[in-house]
Image (cartoon, helix red, strand yellow):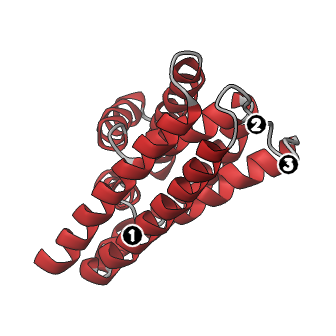
Amino acid sequence: MFSIAVAAVVFGIIFLAELPDKTALAGLVLGTRFRGSYVFAGVAAAFVVHVILAVAAGSVLTLLPQRPLQAVVGVLFLAGAAMLLREALKKDDEDEEEVKEPEDPSFWKVAGSGFMLILVAEFGDLTQIMTANLAARYDDPISVGVGAVLALWAVAGLGILGGQALLKRVPLTLITKIAAGVMVVMAGWSFFEAIAG
């Protein structure tokens, strides 16, 4: 039976936990490059998959070894930062005023990119583990799932809208460099957690 109270509690917890996470950053970066609705469709679908996995797994995900998981997350952040920096350096060589459109900004390509980015980056993330814990605690998979999905969608939507608004005021290369710097910091934090336990 669906509980609005459980869904609201889960929404609040997951929203606050995900807001400073890489999802908002990924949405912001993708939102500066592609049509927001296409990005959101892919990101939203990936979050549904993550929440289904978390709710189905319940508390089992909390048994995963945290240190190796954090090390993998750190490597993924570094790889993402390297790709962003490479793109920013390539753009520095181009005319700053001329922002080129992606080769194929079709719905399926943009949504697929957003889906894959979130699917890989968010696997085993804090909010996925928290969703599994909340599903085990409340024993109400539908309420927990709805609350978690809506929270994740809200954060992604804020990131995408923020990216589109930011692009009107700040050059794309600067946004890309800042995003790469944030990813390096997040990689360092993940490595610290992997070592410190």
Question: Which residue corresponds to the image point at 68% horizontal and 36% vertical from the top-left?
Answer: 33
Vertical order, 139 against 95 (above or below) = below
Give me the disc on residue 38.
2
User: In the displayed structure, does residue 105 sit left or right of residue 18?
Assistant: right
Task: Say which quarter of the image contains residue 86.
Answer: bottom right
Crowding around mark 1 (Cα neighbors within 10 Å: few <14, some 14 to 19, many 20+) is: many
Q: Residue at x 45, y 39 (%)?
A: 24
- Left or right for 159, reference 59: right
Q: Earlier in the sequence, mark 2 or mark 1?
A: 2
Horizontal and vertical percent for residue 16? 30, 36
Circle 1: element type: helix
Q: At label 2, which amino acid type do we have? A: Tyr
In terms of secondary structure, where does tag 2 sit? Answer: helix
Rendering coords of residue 9 (x, y %):
31, 34
Closer to the chain start, of discs 2 and 3, is: 2
The C terminus sits in image quarter: bottom left
* x 55%, y 65%: residue: 120
In the image, 97 versus 130, the foreground residue is: 97
Q: Earlier in the sequence, mark 1 or mark 3?
A: 1
Label drawn at residue 73: 1
The residue beneath circle 3 is: 108
Up-down relation of residue 78 to residue 93 (above or below)? below
Residue type at mark 3? Trp
Question: Is mark 1 in CB contact (under 8 Å) with mark 3?
Answer: no
Q: Is residue 79 visible?
A: yes
Amino acid type, callout 1: Val
**In x, y percent, where is residue 175?**
49, 36
Does residue 51 appear in this view?
no
Check if mark 2's residue and mark 3's residue have beta carbons within 8 Å: no
Q: Residues within 10 Å of mark 2 (few under 14, many from 20)?
A: many
